[in-house]
Amino acid sequence: MHTTTTTTLLHNDSLLFVIREGESIQRHPFWKFLNDEDRQYFGFSMKKNLLQGDFSRTLVFPSGRIALILGVCEKKKYNARRTILTARRAIVSARAERISHLTVALEDFASLRSIPEEVASRIATQFEVANFEFVAHRTAPKSGWGFVESISIFISSKNSSLIRAVAEGKIIGEEINKTRLLSNTPGGDMTPSHLAGAAVQVGKSCGIKVTVLKEKEIEELGMGGVLGVAKGSSEPPRFIVMEFSGGKKNESPTVLVGKGVTFDTGGLNLKPSNGIYEMHMDMSGGAATIHTIAAAARLKLKKNIVGLIPAVENMPSGSSYRPGDLLKSMSGKTIEVMNTDAEGRVILADALEYAKRYNPKIVIDIATLTGAAMVALGQRASAVFSNEENIHESLCEAGERAGDYAWPLPLWEEYEADVKGTFGDFANSGKSRYGGAIEGAVFLRQFIRNSDGSDAYPWAHLDIAPRMTSVEGEFLTKGAAGAPVALLLAFLRK
């Protein structure tokens, strides 16, 4: 979608009017651009219908100009969260009405105490994500898909910082959509090798160094977790390393570790039929890692960022790893397999050990790790854990700014008893059915530690299982939601 800023309106522009409850339409910045006949018709139509609160409708003025009208709550309740939904609603409504070119007023998306540049960037991102639909494998209708082709954001005067903010927001939205495209790709097409190929292509287009380790190299590194999970599949594992050098040469990098299970059957602990359908998206953490780094490169962030993605399929076969198996991880610590469907933490254990070689400033792992996180939080926020309080506070605050929400859960030492192994060092599944999201995070923490028990680096774990797919009421099409690309970029940029 083509997104620009403008200080003028063309006669045939389709206009968006966001009308706050209790406010006159005369206050809207587009009112002055309407002729007398259009104003009279507009006022009559609004008064006649007595519309209040959330509503959407389209008017065709006597002049022929089209207006898309969205009703929202009163100004004092119109916060940043509501502006995000309003921006998405605008695109969804425009698509429904087959409006291909839309002009919007930046002022419509400003809440109390909002910063114009943040508003401009935020809504440019939301316009992009709301205009996405996974149609790669569908036959196009004769009338077309109805995507919005262009958005013009009206500002009162030319402002270079606002123009830049819009361009940056558009980039973020594009990379979120590319994340969704990867995640939505069927598992038969998105194998570990294909995921690695996608990372290589991103590297070439964005100037990022990409190295793909194959099975022999993974074995030489002693990554018993990655090899163990991959044993049941005919598709060999890959370990993807992406290195973006935007900061100073000797500056420690931020390391992002993305879970790349390209299809998760559960292994021998096979998932039930209602839980296996969307498991081609179990590599969403890997996809988010790839495109967060791509966005960082396109935004020219002055940061050094490394992405690590262990990529495997978790399949049942005669060669699958078994409950009761003992896997030796890259760190030398052994993993007692209690459940083959707790495979994500097993492969991440090796990646978290590999991260130590970068002397990282911080490591953030991103994984659709547990259904338990969904039980705790529903489907509207990722769970965040960290070994440093200021990190999870910063991540939650970044998510609030970006509209990509997260909420902290505890990482107390008392929980470590739940992941102690009987015949190995650590068990990949807890001793009860309670607190599964916490147990997954506590398990991962064991693999960021040094031999003396201290943590090797500042670390956060994002369990994005709640945000793997979009949900009703957030004005995103069905399928992958693209979390937590926006959150991570807000965190990295600050």
Image: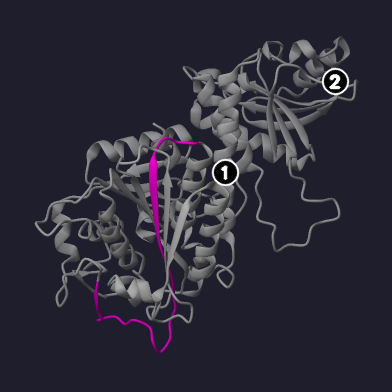
Q: For mark 2, what is the residue?
A: 11
Nearer the observer, 118 or 212: 212
Q: Residue at x 48, y 82 (%)?
A: 234
Q: Residue under label 1, please give it.
A: 473
Residue 394 or residue 361, whichever sits in front: 361
Q: Residue 310 magenta-drawn?
A: yes
Q: Count neighbours of disc 2 (C-alpha within 10 A) and say few if under 14, some if 14 to 19, many if 20 or more.
A: few
Q: Is residue 29 left or right of residue 337?
A: right
Mark 2: secondary structure: loop
Q: In this view, does 181 lie to the left or right of 266?
A: right
Q: Which x, y percent locates residue 238?
A: 43, 69
Quadrant of the image containing the C terminus: top left
Image coordinates of residue 75 in percent, x first then y, are 54, 18
> Percent from the top left, x then y, of residue 242?
43, 54
Q: What residue type is labelled 1?
A: Gly
Residue 88 in the magenta stretch? The answer is no
The type of residue carrying mark 2 is His
Of 125 and 473, the residue lying toward us: 125
Q: How far apart are marks 2 and 1 (CA)?
A: 34 Å
Left or right of residue 357, residue 423 in this image: left
Q: Position of residue 122 (x, y in %)?
A: 54, 31
Report the span colored magenta: 300-328
Judge depth for marks 2 and 1 and give the one in front. Answer: 2
